[in-house]
Each structure stands twice: as structure tokens, then as C-alpha cells.
Image (cartoon, rainbow, N blue to C red):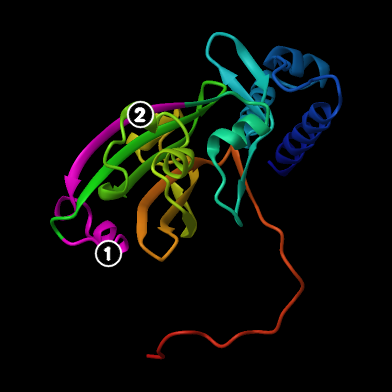
Amino acid sequence: MAKTASFHEQLIEKLRKLLRSRQFVSGAKFLTEREIAERFDTSRPTANKALSSLVSTGLLEFRQGAGTFVRGSVLDYDLQHLVSFTEKAKAAGKKPGTQVMALQKLSAADAPAAVAQALHASPDEPLLFLERLRLADGQPVIYERRHVVARFCTAMTKADAKGSLYGYWTTKCHLAISGADESIRAVNASATQAAALGIPPNTACLLVVATGFLEGGAPLWHEETLYRSDAYEFRNQLGGVSGPKPARGRMR
């Protein structure tokens, strides 16, 4: 058993090395199960298992009826600044796209309690609920559910929501955005989320929960945004080592 596992790991490493070479560029069709078995003198089930492992880690992607292909470069999530997805995708050489799944008005009383609390909204405060799917080169990579304080952008349409919200708010609504408070954690995609993103249910993803603010401190939006972990890398630049700081809050 251990010998089989060891050979399987060696095969995966050989295929990784092949991917790092210039023989297979981004978007190129990769070796088939049969070609791997013949080239590395192994069984087809072992070759299939190695291919599946590289697909699950995001190095390859399987296209129904076409084969297995080398994935393009992943997108970066900037942990220090608010950056438009549209601009990030273009910078990565990908074509950005947006599918607006819902845009509707509701009162804060009809939104989840955590949303109303984050937005400091009274029960009768009008909100906009926005559900979007963000695409890179036609592939879904982000599933977004966002509530927005309606009085700041009462004229928002689905056409507006198909582009950069940051661009819409700052240009058309003349709003000054100061930043956002956000938390990030790993979650497994629900059946609904997985269907939207085109991934198997329970696939590990990265969930960003954030509240965005205008200059002056007024909340503008609250979002729960799911990122495909095979399409995104979260990057940050850290400073030097500092001493421990006292914990904030009350002791119990």
C-alpha cells in the first residue's frame, strides 16, 4: 500500500515538473490518461488519479468532451486595498464579465439581522440586494451577495451592476469610499453556490464577509462573497516581527 502511494506521489511530482517546463503553456491541452500511462510506465487508473489530483489543486482543468488543459494564472486578491475585480482581471490578462442574478429593493427589516446591524440601518431603511457572478474568460470565479444602502445610489440599474461597483459609486454617484472591514475564512461551497460557480458541492472556497464605508464613517455596503480557491490567491506584504500586543475586550 505504501509503495503504491509513494509511486503515485512521484508521478504527481513528475507531472508538476512537466507543467513547470515550457512544453505546456497556459491554456494548452495536457497529456491524456493513456499518454501518461505509456510515458511513465504506469497503469491508467494511477494516471487518472494523478490527473485528478492536479485538477483538484488548480493546476489543470477538465473540459467535458475536450480533455484536460493547463490552467491560466490565478487572480490575486489584494488584502491591503479595495481593487476592482474588473481591473484585476484585465491586469491578469483575462476578460472580465459579470452576470447579474438579482437586483431588488427591500427594507432592512427584510434583510438578515447581521446585515442591518452592520449597515446601522433602521427597520424601514431602504436597501438594495445584489447577487452577482463574476467571470474571468467566461469562467465563474466569484459568487457575490451584497446589500447596499439605497439612498446613496437610488438610480442603480442592472446595467450599472454589470460593471465595477467601485467605479459606479465614485464616478456616477460621486461617493468617496474610505475602505472596508473584512474577515476571510475557508468554507465548503453549498449546493447553490457550487452550482453557480460550476464546482462540485462542498468544494473548499474562501469566503470574504465585509462592510464598506464612506468617508465620514457611514456604511455603504455589506457583502458575503465566495471566491473559488483554485482561481484566487490571497496575498499580503508583511512587515517585521513585532512583540505581542495585549488582547482587546473583556476577560470572562
Helix, strand or loop status at disc 2? strand
Badge 2: residue crowd in 10 Å (few <14, some 14–19, many ≥20): some
Three-letter code, disc 2: Val
When the figure is inspected, residue 192 is found, relative to residue 68, above or below; the finding is below
Q: Which residues are magenta?
A: 98-122
Q: Which residue is mark 1?
A: 120
Q: Is residue 73 left or right of residue 150?
A: right
Does residue 19 appear in the picture of this structure? yes
Q: At 35% across and 29% down in the image, what residue appears?
A: 100
Q: Residues within 10 Å of mark 1 (few under 14, many from 20)?
A: some
Work out whether 34 lies above or below 244: above
Give the quarter of the figure containing the N terminus: top right
Q: In the rendered structure, does residue 224 fall within the stretch colored magenta?
A: no
Determine if residue 195 is in view.
no
User: In this picture, is 146 found above or below 120?
Assistant: above
Q: Which mark is residue 100?
A: 2
Q: How many marks?
A: 2
Expressed as whole percent of the image width and height from the top left, the position of residue 174 reads 42, 46
Farthest residue in the bottom direction?
A: 251
On residue 202, the disc is none
Q: Looking at the image, is mark 2 or mark 1 earlier in the sequence?
A: 2
- Mark-to-mark CA distance, 2 and 1: 26 Å
Q: Is label 1 in a helix, a strand or a loop? A: loop
* Residue at 18%, 55% in the rendered image: 125
Residue 4 percent across, percent down from the top left: 72, 36
